[in-house]
Amino acid sequence: MNELILLQVNFGLNVASLIGFMQIIFAVAYILAMIILLIQRARRLETLSLIIYVFQTIIIPIFLLTSGLILVFQGWRLDPILQFMQFLLTVLIIYLCIKDIVINGGYRNR
């Protein structure tokens, strides 16, 4: 009855797990940047825009963290073409997030 069951976690350092680490790091950086931008611009935004930005600030890091953790722990199972697809999706998401942060920062100077 008092048996200790240890589960093995397969963890490998390959392209998929590196992409997963990159997504986790970017999710934390994105949420911090968006919180700072929202604090600066909250009074100037309309209600609907503020709701959309808050929703985006919550949802994008959750998706990136979930995807990153899956890739870190299960990325060794992916075929090279699926790893390349994950890389392309990660680059697209990071580009769109950086574009959003830069555009929001640009409006601050006006």
Image (cartoon, grey):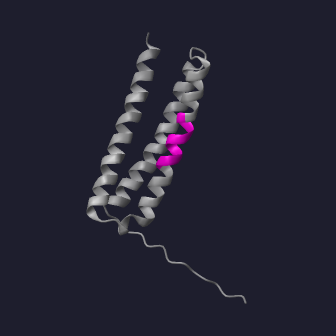
Which residue of the protein is positioned furthest toward the front in this rendering? Answer: 48
Which residue of the protein is positioned furthest toward the bottom in this rendering? Answer: 1
Q: How many marks?
A: 0
Above/below status of 94 relative to 20: above
- At which x and y percent is residue 98? 38, 33
Residue at image position (42%, 49%) is 23
- At which x and y percent is residue 45? 56, 17
Q: Toward which corner of the image does residue 43 lie, by quadrant?
A: top right
Q: Toward which corner of the image does residue 59 lie, by quadrant?
A: top right
For this view, does 89 lie left or right of residue 110? Answer: left
Residue at image position (31%, 58%) is 83
Which stretch appears magenta? 56-64
Locate the N terminus and report the quarter of the image it occupies: bottom right
Above/below status of 58 relative to 44: below
Above/below status of 65 relative to 6: above
Which residue of the protein is positioned furthest toward the top in this rendering? Answer: 110
For this view, does 73 lie left or right of residue 52? Answer: left
Q: Toward which corner of the image does residue 7 lie, by quadrant?
A: bottom right
Residue at image position (51%, 31%) is 34
In magenta segment, residue 58: yes
Which residue of the protein is positioned furthest toward the right in this rendering? Answer: 1
- Magenta stretch secondary structure, dominant: helix
Locate the C terminus and report the quarter of the image it occupies: top left
- At which x and y percent is residue 103? 40, 22
- At which x and y percent is residue 28? 50, 43
In magenta segment, residue 14: no
Residue at image position (34%, 41%) is 92
Q: Name the one closer to the observer, 46 or 65.
A: 46
